[in-house]
Amino acid sequence: MSNLPAYERDPFATALETRIVAHGEEQGRPFAVLEDTLFYPEGGGQPCDFGTVNGVSVVDVQKRGGEIRHYLGAALAEGRASLKLDWARRFDHMQQHTGQHLLTAVAQDQFKWETTAFHLGAVTCDIELSAASISLREMERLEEAVAEEIRARREITARWVSAEGYAQEAVRSRGLPEGHSGDIRLVQIAGVDLNTCGGTHLRHTGEIEALKLLGAESIRGGTRLFYVAGGRLRARLGAHEQRNAALRAALGAPDEDLMPALQTKLDQLLALDRRTRKLEEELAEHMAAALAARPGAWVDMHLEHKDAAFLQKLARGILTADPAKAVFLTTETNGQGLFLLSAGEASGLDVPAAGKAVAAALGAKGGGSGKSFQGKAPSLAGRPQALEALGVVGH
């Protein structure tokens, strides 16, 4: 086909001189239509290409009513257009998409698992397979079978066929876009796969470099299989190595002992947490006894770096010891204020009404019923006003 866009004629081209033949705006986004284009429009599970037109960023590319619209960071007028492709993004997409074709073919031919969906994500990719479940051993076998085809450097080609010719081809997928008419594009991995596809692909399977299966999950009666290929795999491995180096330094252990060392640290932290909670309970008990013994109808106290659970324990201890008292407790932690208003059974305080007055004074959100009202405030700057509302000034 002589009128193929540049991204189909040569998916490895990174620059092109062409013309802007139309421009406009769609939902506030300026766009341009080009005489020819390097930029692949989103479709078939593959995201669009990025790059620049006359130095202006291409932020999206979509097919609209038979034309390809390039959505831009700024409006451009008709005339000469110099295109530069974000090659790193394009090559990544070609590695992931070609990897999907190969993974799909091997999964079906060697394991009888049909691919029902594909997603090329920004971090990982996935395919959905018609397998109720996939074991770890089966994943290992599938990954190795794919690796064999990568090492074989199978040639990858694309061609167009007529609808009549298409009916004679041994095409793996018979799915075509709704309303499609005219010739059909086929992508072939020599000796492995022939499929309908409009995306950009590599020249041979060796350019995938490698493909790693990351895990699986059950979905809609089948299995979703996650993977990364090529540069993503190397980047992922590099990130893992950096994390492992940091963990080795922090835990003082080699790679093979990182998990036992981490588990030891977690066990120690759990033990410390239990000890801390026990000490906090004991502290609350002692404080409650001392505060309950004070004369007067009110206990008003601000505590530093406590949580709502501690305030509640302290209030319960005080009111158990002296049911005639009312308690107003506050704390501030991580830049947020907490308050608790509570009254014993023998106290005559209308807690819900008093609580609303306190919340208003603190600019806080809170609630409660009966004998307890608690809430959170952006700060405790209004604490003196809250005490005044309670009638505790000078207490």
Image (cartoon, helix red, strand yellow):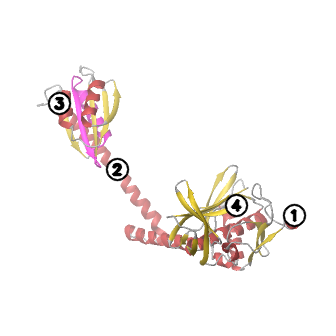
Q: CA gap, disc 3 to disc 1?
A: 86 Å
The residue tagged 4 is: 66
Q: Quadrant of the C terminus?
A: top left
Dot in front, 3 or 2: 3
Percent from the top left, x then y, of residue 144?
68, 72
The residue tagged 2 is: 273
Identify the residue at the far front of this view.
78
Residue numbers of the magenta segment? 306-335
Q: Any mark on residue 155, and which? A: none
Q: Secondary structure at mark 3?
A: helix
Q: Any mark on residue 388, and which? A: 3
Dot in front, 1 or 4: 4
Which is more toward the observer, 305 or 195?
195
Which is more toward the observer, 139 or 388?
388
Q: Any mark on residue 167, and which? A: 1
Answer yes or no: do the residues labelled 1 and 4 have beta carbons within 8 Å? no
Percent from the top left, x then y, of residue 2?
76, 75
Mark 3 vs 4, N-terminal side: 4
Give, as a three-letter code, the residue at label 3.
Glu
Residue 238 among those drawn in magenta = no
Q: CA gap, disc 2 to disc 1?
A: 69 Å
Kindly identify the residue that appears in the image at 49 percent across and 69 percent down: 240
Mark 3 vs 2, N-terminal side: 2
